[in-house]
Amino acid sequence: MRATVQAFFHPPSSTISYVVYDRPGGAAAIVDSVLDFDGASGRLGTASADALAGFVAEQGLTVAWILETHIHADHLSAAHRLQDRLGGRIGIGARVAEVQTHFGKVFNAPLGPRRNGACFDRLFEDGEAFTVGDLDGEALHTPGHTPDSVSYRIGDALFVGDTLFMPDGGTARCDFPGGDARQMYCSLRRLLALPEETRVFVCHDYAPGGRSHAWETTVGEQRRANIHVRDGVDVESYVAMRAARDRTLSMPALIIPAVQVNVAAGRLPAPEANGAVYLKMPVNVL
């Protein structure tokens, strides 16, 4: 069944969030939502989340799922705030516990509700089925960028998170904790083995060459034209390319605040005695 997909572009992080639904007045899933955050001032905003919620209300949709493709390092998730406003269950890949454990050590913080994925409502195993109203869904474990990375096939649409970019953007980095370029290659080939007409929706687009931002492609287009993983690129070539490229990349600007919030499904730390909320800044750790 063909899914209806509405995209929302977040310019500061070049992130694309999605509302995918079966029909107006039906059921919806929200994929990779964004909470606005100014790193210089530490101020939060909800304009991006409000746009998603406004569209849901405009279409008369009931939110069944709020889905994360992985623990993002470049933006803060609005999942918890959207759940409070719209309902739905927050889902992520089952290996999120590995990421939570790693960053619990980085920030020297007790995991508490972050332990073993407990702050998420659903931890998807590879191949696990779910529904969005009349649409059939499937979670596909696609590690490589991060160990918890998962892609969601909903109807004829595939939401790939940071695993694939548009064909001229290639693929995502593999140098985060638990990342692995060989695993990434296997994940990519798995996705590109899906029917060529499958619509692919990416989580980021950096508009290489100054073109207009774009976020929808197909499996067939990726197989023919992806600059990193088109048909004919073998695993050794991919791993060598990825290692060389990753050495040139800087850390994402918001990785420190983002992971602290995202490992808790978008929840902020509890206020301290003075009523203020604080995020830690590790020095010489990352």
Image (cartoon, rainbow, N blue to C red):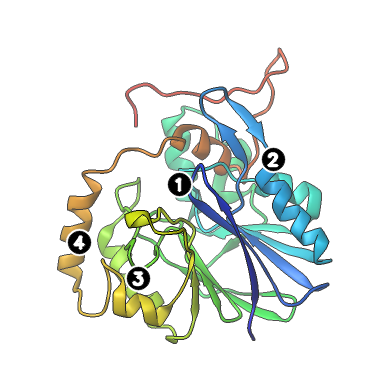
In the depicted structure, whether residue 112 falls above or below residue 223: above
**In front: label 3 or label 1:** 3
What separation in Å lies between label 1 and label 4 (alpha carbons)?
Answer: 22 Å
Q: Residues within 10 Å of mark 1 (few under 14, many from 20)?
A: many
73 to the left or right of 274:
left
The tag on residue 99 is 1
Eye-nearest disc, 4 or 2:
2
Q: Which residue is mark 2?
A: 46
Mark 3–mark 1 Cα distance, whole angstroms, equals 21 Å
| Front-most of residues 171 and 272 | 171
Residue lying furthest top in this view? 274
Mark closer to the observer (3, 2): 2
Q: Please, what is the three-letter code of the amino acid marked with disc 2? A: Thr
Question: Between residues 10 and 154, which one lies in front from this camera angle?
Answer: 10
Mark 2 to mark 1: distance in Å? 26 Å
Q: Which mark is residue 188?
A: 3
Mark 4–mark 2 distance (CA, rounded to whole Å): 39 Å
